[in-house]
Every structure is written in C-alpha cells, then in structure tokens.
Amino acid sequence: MKTILLNPGPVTLSRRVREAMSRPDLCHREPEFGALQDGLRRKLLDVYALDPADWAAVLLTGSGTAAVEAMLTSLVPADGRLLIVENGVYGERMTHIARSYGIAHERVTAPWSDAIDLSAVERALGDGDFTHVAVVHHETTTGRLNDIAALSKLAAAHGARLLLDSVSGFGAETLDFDGWHLDGCAAAANKCLHGVPGSAFVLVRRAAPAAAPSRTVYLDLHAYLAQQDRRATPFTQSVQTFYALDEALDEFFEEGGRRGRQALFRHRMTRIREALLALGVEPLLPDAESSCVLQSFRLPPGHDYEAVHDRLKQDGFIVYAGQGGLSGRVFRISAMGDITEEDLARLLDAFSTLFRTVGRRD
C-alpha cells in the first residue's frame, strides 16, 4: 500500500520526480551543471512571472531554514535594524537566527493561534528606525496565512522593506513581490513545488543592499548570486536534488502553474475540512484565515495524537503533530504532494472509521 505524506514537507513524490534523481552523475564545475542551474533559476522566477532584470533566484543546498538564514544574514545591512513579527514557531526561529548573528532586532509577538498584531507592529515601527521587517507568510505551526498585504503597507509607510519566509507558501499562495515591497523571499523545493528535500532558494531583489561585512561564508547570498550569474557556484551543490526540482517545476507548469497548484490544494483541503467537520472534528482556525496548503484540527475528546497518528499510518497516511503548547491539542494535515482522487477518497474513509463516534449524542 502506498504511504501518503500529509505532513508539511517532505511530500509524496511523483514517479517522474523520483526517477529524475537517476539522471547521469554530473560535476558541479561542468558546463552541463551551469545549464541546469540557469534553467532552474529561470523557472523559479517564472512561478510568479518576475522580471530577471529586477529579481534573481539564488539556489542553495539545504533546507528551508537555510534559505531563511541566508536571507536574513545577507540582506539586512551591517547598520540595519530588523523587526521580526512572530505568531508561530517559524517566526520565533527568525528571532533565533537574528540573535545568533548579532543582527540588531526587535520582535512583535502574538499567540500562536492569533493573527499578526498589526497595531503592535505599527507602534514598533513608529518607535524604531527599522530597515527591514521579517515575517512568515504561511505559518505552518497552525496553518495560518498571515496578512502580508496589510503588514507591508505599514512597513512601507515607515521606510522598511519586507523579508518573507514563504517556505510553505511559495508556488501555491499569492505573493505580490512588488506590491509588498519585498527585498527577499525564502522558499524550498520540497513543499508546494513537489521537489525533494535538499534544495532551497531565495528570490532576491537585485537592488537589495548587501550585508557588509558578510556575516556568513556558506550562506552568503551575494557570493552565490555573483557566481550563479556567471553559471558557476561557490560550493558543491546537491546535483540530484536539482535534477528533481527541475522535473518538479516542469510538472508544476504542465499542471497550471501557481494558480493550478492553488486550485488543487484548495480542492483537497476543502474536502478534508468538510469531511472532518461532518464527523465533529473542529478546525483550529477559520477557513478564511487558513492556507490552502495545510490546516490544523482540534483533537476530539478521547483521541490523543499518538493514537490518531498510528491508526492513520496503518491506513497509509502520515499526519503531523502540533508543536509546543499545541502538541496535545491539534493534528495538522497538508494537501501537498502526489495525491490522487482515489487516495483522497481512501483518506476520507479512514477519517470516517477513526472519528465515527465523535459527533454521536447518546
């Protein structure tokens, strides 16, 4: 029985993406690698129809966190100040990164289940001379899709640029690179694009300021950008995961690009949400505040996560636990990956068996 990953990455791969990793071995110093890298960079810009004169895709070997760390350390100038907006684990991780590198920063926090506190952001921006605001687009701690449009207006009014962690939104959710005043957007291959873990990237506005001096060696985006613009790379890249991303992007565009992927995820998540609601399993957040990529659901009385996980795993599905204070309260389900309508129907049957007593009234 095929096992379907419903966690927020890695995803269940299509056969053609998996087979792409069996392409011939390739040295990263050969011209064929330069051609592969060039093609990937063009395709990543095409996901949101970005002008290569204004934007560049910088490819890294690493996880989504590597891309976020590269973005923060490379795009906040040495004399810059960063305002970090937190309402989940991944916002908190950006604070950890800034603290580790000694980047001048302050934070605005909200409870994990809450929306961004825009009034607190506005107060903080008025009290400090911030060059950048960092925020998570889709916070997979809860499945919340943060209101980046409203946040970006506040940042722009105070002369600050946005650095966006869209690791779990890029390729499916709407991003307005120019309207949101972005200087950088970090993402990864093994989420909405349906690639494999090991490849990440940052879309960088070419006019964005350099961090001087460089805070890091391996994650210096400016070094990568200079080399990749010359069809080279400063360090060895993960060639096989690049092959997989190349195939995944071809598949992505064949299936309708970002709009097609968003519609697919919305279809899947709507069916999952409606089925669980009918069984008495409540979502953590309203649908209008949630991503199409992943949502959280409250564990019903009498059901603990381990039992839910293990039963669904027996049926061929992997769901994800809540984090921190939510660990005993919710489970999370993603709509990403190579999932057929038959797989989806089988999942809904598994839910029906598992939760059939939740809504019963004796």
Image (tube, helix red, strand yellow):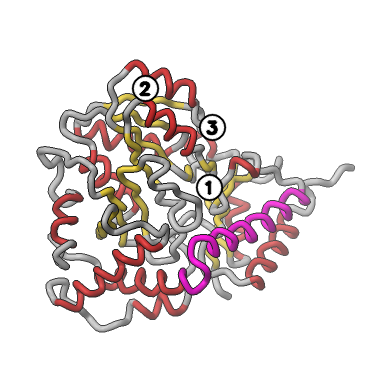
Q: Main secondary structure of the magenta part?
A: helix
In-image side of 255 versus 197 (left or right): right
Indicate which disc residue 321 carries.
1
In this rendering, the label closer to the viewer, 2 or 3? 2
Query: Which quadrant: the C terminus?
Result: top right
Residue 89 image position (x, y, % from top left): 43, 38
Residue 233 image position (x, y, % from top left): 15, 63
- The answer to whether marks 2 and 1 mark residues whose Cβ atoms lie closer than 8 Å is no
Indicate which disc residue 115 carries.
3
Residue 109 image position (x, y, % from top left): 44, 26
Asked if residue 189 is among those painted magenta in the image, a careful observer would answer no
Residue sitting nearer the eye, 180 or 97: 180
Q: First in sequence, mark 3 or 1: give its number.
A: 3
Residue drawn at the location 17% of the way across and 49% of the way down: 220
In this rendering, the label closer to the viewer, 3 or 1? 3
- First to last magenta residue range: 252-279
Residue drawn at the location 52% of the way across and 68% of the way down: 256
The local crowd at label 2, few if under 14, some if 14 to 19, many if 20 or more residues have their Cα within 10 Å, is many
Q: Amino acid under label 1? A: Ala
Asked if residue 255 is among those painted magenta in the image, a careful observer would answer yes
Q: Determine the secondary structure under disc 1.
A: strand
Indicate which disc residue 125 carries.
2
